[in-house]
Image (cartoon, grey):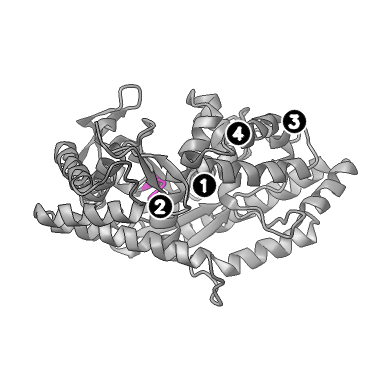
Amino acid sequence: MSKIKFIIKRSGSKVPFKPERIMNAIYRAAVSLGGRDKNTAEKLAKEVVEFLEKPAPENYIPNIEEIQDFVEKVLIKNGHSQVAKAYILYRNERNRKRRERFKRSSHPSENIPWPKIWRILDWAVSKNVHTIEALNRRIRKEEFPAIVNESESFYAANINTAAELISEKGDNLKMVIISGPSSSGKTTTTIKLEQHLSEKDLKFKPLNIDNYFFDLAMHPKDEFGDYDFETPQALDLKLINEHLKRLCNGEQVLIPFYDFKTGTRKLNQTPMKLEENEILLIDSLHGLFPAMTKGISDDVKFKLYLESLLQMKNSDGQFIRWTDLRMIRRMLRDASYRAYNPEQTLLHWHYVRASELRNIIPNIGTADYIINSGMPYELPLYKHKLLQNFKNWVTKYKDDPLHEDAFLRAVRVLKILNEVEPVDDDSPIPSDSVLREFIGGSIYKY
């Protein structure tokens, strides 16, 4: 048993010391480079703890920076220079982002599609749904069905534009990639887009990227038993890239099969080949991640990015965060289809967000077109479904330093739900709406 019982976080709070967090940090750095050796990560973590304890006086409480310094030293000492470099770069990146949060930047983010945002905001203002209070006024005037119709029409126009752009790509097109962060509505959008393009005599063959997951046991896991399967390195990127190249060249490949019940993958299971005039259709969280389609010319690809780009302010004049909207969507979807309760989604979301910021959002500029799936009418429906849950989570995690992220998200969402006018009846929402992917009642099979 370790002599060290507690550590000091950057926030100054004291939390229990858990050596497995060191192992996870080392293993996560190795995974980012393609390594999958947990035994080595465990040995290195044990050595870090020994280094910490050697000079430690009784009741010694190290801070997180001290521990990270020792991790770097142990990695380099044992000849793991590449892993040490990955660990140092990730550590520096996190520190830079923390500093940026505490200062105002005079430069707008390069990761936000500003031209698209201005068009969406202009539309929201014209429909009087740009603030929660404006939305509430329309709901109180019994205009909820009209808001639904306006929102769905705006989304449909985005789909139509994407279909036109894809069809204009010409005979060189070999694959359409639909990407975007978790719960942005990729599955429904993929189905709708395929329907539109079929009318233009384009033939598609879907490739399920989920079958390329590594076995669950190979993913990093935290001290709460939660696996980090949100990163692109959770996928066998090398095999995906190889198969995509061969498919584009007209060759046959054997697709693996991933069993989500057992968390294991079987290789070489399903033969696949693109026939003449067929186009590969890929719906993937990390479709824009460079390593996935490395070496494949952009001339044969059309890259579509999806995000819930809602433009609506709360009573404090703050825009509602897109990630919060998608978190609520995922809570409802996972509870309905994956036996994953909403609280688990809240506690796991820091993994989702970290991967988005690091691996998904920075690639938005490489997309050929962006579709907005954010619906102004969503929030009124969510109030009666999850309001009490968020109240409970704010109380439960208020003084829990280990779940500070969950607490802050719960507080933020609770404020929004408290402000919005509730709507219990979802019958005005079309059965083919992208929102049905999350609240149920869709005509599509997911």
The residue under label 2 is 176
Residue type, mark 4 in image: Trp
Q: Nearer the viewer, residue 396 or 231?
A: 396
Of marks 3 and 1, the one in the foreground: 3
Indicate yes or no whether the magenta region holds residue 283: yes
Q: Pointer 3: what residue?
A: 427
Residue 66 at x, y percent in the picture: 30, 55
| Residue beneath disc 1 | 193
Mark closest to the chain's N terminus, 3 or 1: 1
- First in sequence: mark 4 vs mark 1: 1
Give the distance between the C-alpha atoms of the residues marked 3 and 1, in whole angstroms: 24 Å
**Mark with earlier residue (1, 2):** 2
Q: Mark 1: give few (<14), some (14-19) or many (20+) Cα within 10 Å.
A: some
Q: Quadrant of residue 422?
A: top right
Q: Amino acid at mark 3?
A: Ser
Quarter of the image that includes the N terminus: top left
Quick one: label 4 or label 2, which is nearer the N terminus?
2
The reply to whether the C-beta atoms of the residues labelled 4 and 1 are less than 8 Å apart is no
Mark 4 — residue?
393
Q: Earlier in the sequence, mark 4 or mark 3?
A: 4
Which residue extends farthest left? Answer: 79
Find out whether the residues at labels 1 and 2 contact each other: C-beta distance under 8 Å: yes
Which numbered disc, 4 or 2, marks the residue closer to the eye?
4
Q: Secondary structure at mark 2?
A: strand
